[in-house]
Amino acid sequence: MKFVLRVLFSAAACCASVSMADANTVIVTQSNFGFTPANITINVGDTVQWNWQNFSHTVSEGTDGVINGNELFTFPLDPAHPVVTFTFDAAFVAAHPMSGGLYHYFCAIHFLSGMVGTVTVNGPAATGTSYCPGDGSGTACPCGNNSAVGAQLGCLSSLGNGAGLTATGTPSVSADTVALTGTGMPNSSALYFQGTTQVAAGAGGSFGDGLRCAGGNVVRLGLKTNAGGTSTWPSGGDPAVSVKGGATAGTSFDYQVWYRNAGAFCTASTFNLSNGYAVTWTP
């Protein structure tokens, strides 16, 4: 799946040395048939900027050296596109996790000349704790549709995989940057909601094709439409999680995503859920 890329038609920085253009942008300079530096480390939310110097190249995610439509990103780096950027935001990293956060890329034109590079994305500090996975370790999934043990995903859907819920950001009521991201869902509606207790002491209870994890007094944070199997709350001007959920310092809440899954699968219900995710709020 290709992500929309921001291509900057400016040659002003074409010959810049390796540096930080700003607090969140790391520059890589194309030098003949190589990338300098070839291997960089960034944080989630940072942007990588590739600057062109000479010849025509590509910057294409993967390790096979061939552009075949399976790249997570690919774009030209040439006289017509001298500066190109890609942001490794939380939604992208959550939807396309790599072991150790390591993303490989190559120039398709000069791959055989060894023109390759890597971007290692450091994950943010844990915002909360995942619980209630649909892997059979707690309450059994309704149809034996368990996800892989240790994957921290909900029960399997008609897609053959479970949905995951993660959180990034700072759970501070005075400086809330928490973002809840659901992945592995159909491109359908997804309800993000908050609860005050963990169902069955965190083991969950059978509900639709999955498990209900977050219970007690429930607050509907909001409805999103998944794209590429993923969505994030808040986004697009939504209120902060702490504001919508009424969090105060010292309180702990539980979060989950309830999504539509209309495919004929498991029970007669047309919905499923992610794992649960617990967050404790600070001042």
Image (cartoon, helix red, strand yellow):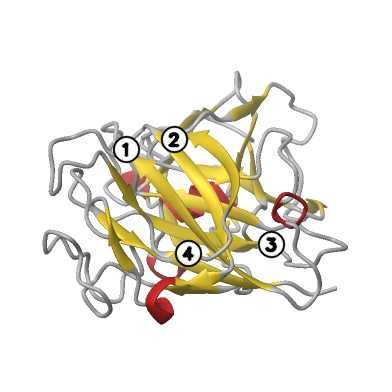
Q: Residue at x 46, y 58 (%)?
A: 165
Q: Which residue is mark 3?
A: 169
Query: Regarding mark 1 in the picture, which secondary structure is present there?
Result: loop
Residue type, mark 4 in image:
Ala
- Per the model, the C-alpha gap separating discs 2 and 3 is 21 Å
Q: Which residue is mark 1?
A: 186
Mark toward the viewer: 4 or 1: 4
**Residue 32 shown left or right of residue 173 in the figure:** left
What quarter of the picture does the N terminus occupy? top left
Residue type, mark 2 in image:
Asn
Q: Relative to 38, say whether 135 is above or below.
A: below
- Per the model, the C-alpha gap separating discs 4 and 2 is 21 Å
**Residue 119 shown left or right of residue 162 in the figure:** right
Query: Regarding mark 2 in the picture, which secondary structure is present there?
Result: loop
Mark toward the viewer: 4 or 2: 4
Q: Which residue is mark 4?
A: 214
